[in-house]
Amino acid sequence: MRVMENTYALIMAGGVGARFWPKSRKSLPKQYLTLVGKETLIQAVSRRLQVIIPVDRIYVVSTKNQIPLIHAQMPWLPPSQLVIEPFGKNTAPCIGLAALHLIRHDPEAVMMVLPSDHLITDTEKFAQILREAVDLVKGNPEALATIGIEPTYPATGYGYIQRGAALDLPSGKAFRVRAFAEKPTHEVAEQFFSTGEFLWNSGIFIWRAATILHLIEDLMPDLAAGLREIDQAIGTPKEAEITERVYKQIHSDSIDYGIMEHASNVMVLEGNFGWSDVGSWQEVYKISPHDENGNILVNDPIVKECRNCYIEAGGRVVAVIGAEDLIVVDTPDALLICKQDQSQEVKWVVEKLKHSSQQKVL
Amino acid sequence: MRVMENTYALIMAGGVGARFWPKSRKSLPKQYLTLVGKETLIQAVSRRLQVIIPVDRIYVVSTKNQIPLIHAQMPWLPPSQLVIEPFGKNTAPCIGLAALHLIRHDPEAVMMVLPSDHLITDTEKFAQILREAVDLVKGNPEALATIGIEPTYPATGYGYIQRGAALDLPSGKAFRVRAFAEKPTHEVAEQFFSTGEFLWNSGIFIWRAATILHLIEDLMPDLAAGLREIDQAIGTPKEAEITERVYKQIHSDSIDYGIMEHASNVMVLEGNFGWSDVGSWQEVYKISPHDENGNILVNDPIVKECRNCYIEAGGRVVAVIGAEDLIVVDTPDALLICKQDQSQEVKWVVEKLKHSSQQKVL
């Protein structure tokens, strides 16, 4: 292992997410689920990071209610590496708060900021690109680096990053960023895709903690004021109370919207390491290994003449005959049956349940 | 109500049946299920019979283990109208045993023998044909009458009755029987269907109790000997013990095979009263009223963009999106998902479970 000095990972784990109901619940968000392979998504993120840095430099930021899940799934994580938000306010406050903690621990800290619920299959390539990004930021202390994913189709579900001039880096795949774009319409996505200039925004960022805090001062003065207030309370008996009061006041903003779209010194490194945001049951089906009938069978369902199905039993007997292109997810109190190409409609079910007498299954 | 003197119904309720798993179980056979409408199948049979005869002439024959179900579903049935077999030995012993009891009660008894798990939609026509059959048997005391169903397609799942010379009866739809045929191959079924001479065997029989007992003496001497032994024990403290001993020795034979195929004085009345043997989940789907999308939704599943589905929730939340031609039956400990046209494969699931560690869901 090549240990990178002053380099830390920040896994953002506060998200909720309705797209994996009935397996995901309000009390059990996506990142804590085993959707592909044998680890939960957050455990896999942590394992990949351990190729780059030792575990004592892996931090997790999450909301108070998820602390028990984090301790259960990452028992090695000491409280000093867990940054707790009272509740979620999107990525800008989350990253700002974590940067405060990191810079107290190490004024030269370089942060690799990563979502907790994405999947990456080529860990070696992933490590190589992150190392390159860290080197880039160390040599160019005011830079913000981000990882862009080479698009394979004109997706409308991701933000895009338009690349500009190439940088002289070993990979040959680093560029200045010309622009960030929010999730496009299908028409715009087609244009982006055809130019070859646009990358998917992976939500992975690399920068010095000091740099992002300076930029928050410049570009998000309200958040900066809140963070200063929290900073003065850290380590005092009033830390939790003040953090909560500040969080109630600050806006819910993404780091993309608050900083990246307005900052001038932004670089993108092109990632090609088998990335997926695991955005739906259909995506889980696509990225998991299938049997000879194209099926993925979890917890031994009884199956006959099924093709291209994802079937996950819970504790009960599940028998499926003659199904094609179907998602079946059985849990002790709720069952989902969904055609593969309509798996985004799970959100519709969740919305419907929110306004029903059956909210207990959310 | 036109009360028919000396006329009794015998509902045969001993059957088990694996085709409605997971709703049917070893301990809850098909006839005790609500599959269509709001009554169980046996309750519907009883209700239809009450158009013809008073309830004190409706008898049920079943096996010991089903007594609690019968009392629960037919609370009006006195013990004197419940004939109990120690276990099932097909229809010949069952009918013979019931005939013994009936003839003790009324030596002139005419029995209408009916399966407990079939569905009939036109109760009036059904009553009319049964009355005609009873009149036929009363006027021709040695006759065996049976009800044949006009085939609507060349089914391979039913036995057939070939009709012969027409009888001079009010309906104009009564015939001498030329032959009985077991369930045919598809080729033979096509031939039967094309001749127009063959009717489906409904398993409904009408005869004098004395007549069927005489024919058992002639054609099934071993069964007759057993029945004589039981007859001597009826009303004594040894009745149950002797019945059980006899049942252990006698063959398991159907009345069709043991009597009907060999008897000479057999008549068939053609029934056209919306008959179904409710043989599979697909059949339940076909004979039940659908909503505007062709769906049948039981116990409020959450459904989006589904067509031609039968979806029955149990106690849990069930959400189904984008399914077509699917059977979904959810119960507290087992779930079935099955393509409509493969619903006969439910038997395969039951066989598989028999040889698994999950027999408790059978």
Image (cartoon, coloured by chain):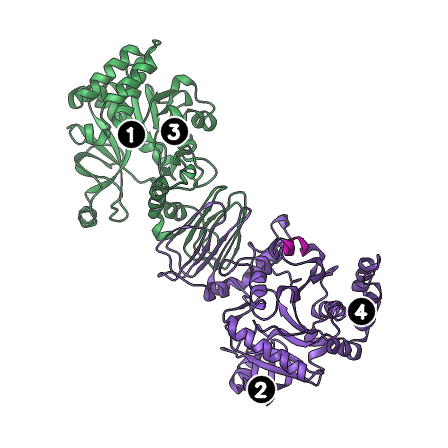
Chain colours: A purple, B green
Quadrant in the picture for residue B162: top left
Q: Quadrant of the N terminus of chain A?
A: bottom right
Q: Chain of mark 3?
A: B
Asked if residue A70 is among those painted magenta in the image, a careful observer would answer yes
What is the x, y in percent for residue B100? 28, 17
Q: Which disc, if any, is residue B132?
A: 1
Residue B207 is left or right of residue A253, and the answer is left
**Distance between the Cα atoms at labels 3 and 4?**
81 Å
Q: Nearer the viewer, mark 1 or mark 4?
A: 4
**Distance between the Cα atoms at labels 1 and 2?**
97 Å
Q: Which residue is mark 3?
A: B49
Q: Which residue is mark 2?
A: A169
Tag 1 and tag 2, C-beta contact below 8 Å: no
Q: Which residue is mark 4?
A: A227
Of residues A352 and A134, the one nearer the viewer is A134
Q: Nearer the viewer, mark 3 or mark 4?
A: 4
Q: Are marks 2 and 4 on the same chain?
A: yes
**Mark 2 burial class by Cα count in 10 Å: few <14, some 14-19, many 20+:** some
